[in-house]
Amino acid sequence: VRADRIEDCERACTETRDFVCKSFNFRAFFPDNCELSHFDSKEFKYDNPAYFEHNSQYDYYERSDMSAGPGPGPASASADCMEVTQTCTPEGMEFSLRTSEAFYGRIYTYGFYDSCFFDGNGGTTSVLRISRANGFPRCGTQQYGDAMTNIVVVQFNDYVQTSRDKKYNLTCYFSGPGEAVVTSNYLDTKTDGRHPTQIEHLPAQNILTSN
């Protein structure tokens, strides 16, 4: 299938009537760049090279609404039932995720999947503690003058990206002794691709004053 955007490939998967599409591969700038499949990682192990080729130009995505059957349904609606909060301290940042259903995915800072992460254990509250620039563990936090920024990825499957995954940009401004302004915005993986850009200046959402 030819798809100009990842949204078009996702739509082709959800709307096809030839078979039950459970996943798709997408790559930009190539003919026939959208591959639909009736298999997903529940049926085949992600680390099995017979079914998943890791060194390819394709990105792999799974549908998150399959427990409710093909097409939009209650399962896809509940996927968006989550709340995120952020706090800032001179030592770093803290990202909290609250979901209405058990979370078994991974929260991590962009580019630091194996060193700065939180693995969901089935709870509904998940917290990732992020070190400041040059802190430990390495989280990739950047310092720009009085601003500290990082990008957090919420991935609902430990092994593969899905259409419900989110990226959040966290920015902390330190405007005085003991005072921090935390701002945030999220970048959706469905539209921004795999190359997010650090955002240094975002409108303030709330002020945190620490003792």
Image: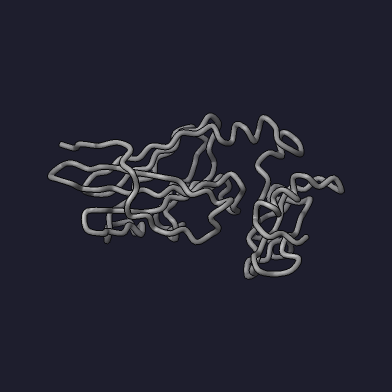
Q: Quadrant of the N terminus?
A: bottom right
Q: Quadrant of the C terminus?
A: top left
Q: Is residue 139 above or below residue 32?
A: above
Q: Is residue 115 above or below residue 87?
A: below
Identity of the residue drawn at 78% across and 45% down: 15
Q: How far across and down, in percent of the image, does residue 151 sit?
A: 41, 53
Identity of the residue drawn at 49% across and 61% down: 195
| Most distant residue in the left direction | 177
- Total number of numbered labels? 0
Q: Quadrant of residue 197?
A: bottom left
Q: Is residue 71 left or right of residue 197?
A: right
Q: Is residue 29 above or below residue 96?
A: below
Q: In terms of depth relative to the viewer, which is nearer, 12 or 132? A: 12
Q: Quadrant of residue 65?
A: top right
Q: In terms of depth relative to the viewer, which is nearer, 48 or 32? A: 32
Q: Is residue 73 left or right of residue 93?
A: right
| Most distant residue in the right direction | 18
Q: Quadrant of residue 79?
A: top right
Q: How far across and down, in percent of the image, does residue 138 sit?
A: 34, 59
Identity of the residue drawn at 49% across and 41% down: 120
Q: Is residue 185 above or below residue 150?
A: above
Q: How far across and down, in percent of the image, does residue 34 sit?
A: 73, 60
Q: How far across and down, in percent of the image, does residue 167 sit?
A: 48, 49
Q: In terms of depth relative to the viewer, which is nearer, 11 or 55? A: 11
